[in-house]
Image (cartoon, rainbow, N blue to C red):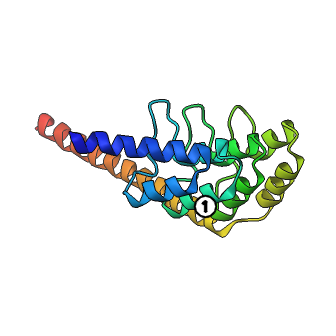
Amino acid sequence: RRRRKERRADSHQLRQAAALGDLATMRSALRMGQAVNEADADGWFALALAACCGKGMGMPVELLLQAGADMDRRLPNGATPVYLAAQNGHKAAVQKLVAAGADLSIGCGGHTPADIAKKRGFVKVAELLYRAAARPNPAAVERMAVREAEAGERLALQRAVIVVQGAWRAKLARREAA
């Protein structure tokens, strides 16, 4: 039990450091083996906090990405880290997320990250996002292909289950008829 409480405290420390852009504390927390993708009770996770609140710096975002943070994870309201960075005009954070291959098509409230940056008056951030969306990012394309393959595997499995269920029904119907 004690280890669980310490782990939660560690994750809280990482999220708090990410929100403040405190690289030294983030590095220390990650060295202690914190869960980089763990969220608090409201659904906030370290990368979302770094992108939204981390003083708009790119280094906290880059550090979390290197530690394995899920760049396309959503908050309960649907916002992704790149959306949050764009919404707040954090160009450096947006650049790091774009370079890492964040999905720029995932929006929130009917707006893409580029749309919300433009709407909020962050013209340079919006231009960066529109340019990035216009050219394919190899990392994003690869992740999309993996997702599509996984979806295809699930569909094939569902079809196989339907076929097996049909075969069993036919077998049972033959037994009942006999």
Which residue is at a point 65% across and 41% down the rendered structure image?
53
Q: Which of these two is toward me, 60 or 135?
A: 60
Above/below status of 111 relative to 132 = above
Left of 70 or right of it: where is 161?
left
Callout 1 amino acid: Glu
Which residue is at a point 61% across and 49% down the rendered structure image?
21
| Residue at the outermost bottom position | 138
Q: Which of these two is toward me, 78 or 11?
A: 11
Local crowd size for mark 1, using a 10 Å CA cut-off: few (<14), some (14–19), many (≥20)? many
Does residue 69 appear in this view?
A: no
Which residue is at a point 79% across and 39% down the rendered structure image?
116
Q: Where residue 172 sits: x, y (%)?
A: 17, 39
- Quarter holding the N terminus is top left
Q: Quadrant of residue 121?
A: top right
Q: Where residue 142 sits: x, y (%)?
A: 58, 66
- The residue where tag 1 is placed is 62
Mark 1 element type: helix
| Residue at the outermost front position | 24
Does residue 24 appear in this view?
A: yes
Above/below status of 16 relative to 29 = above
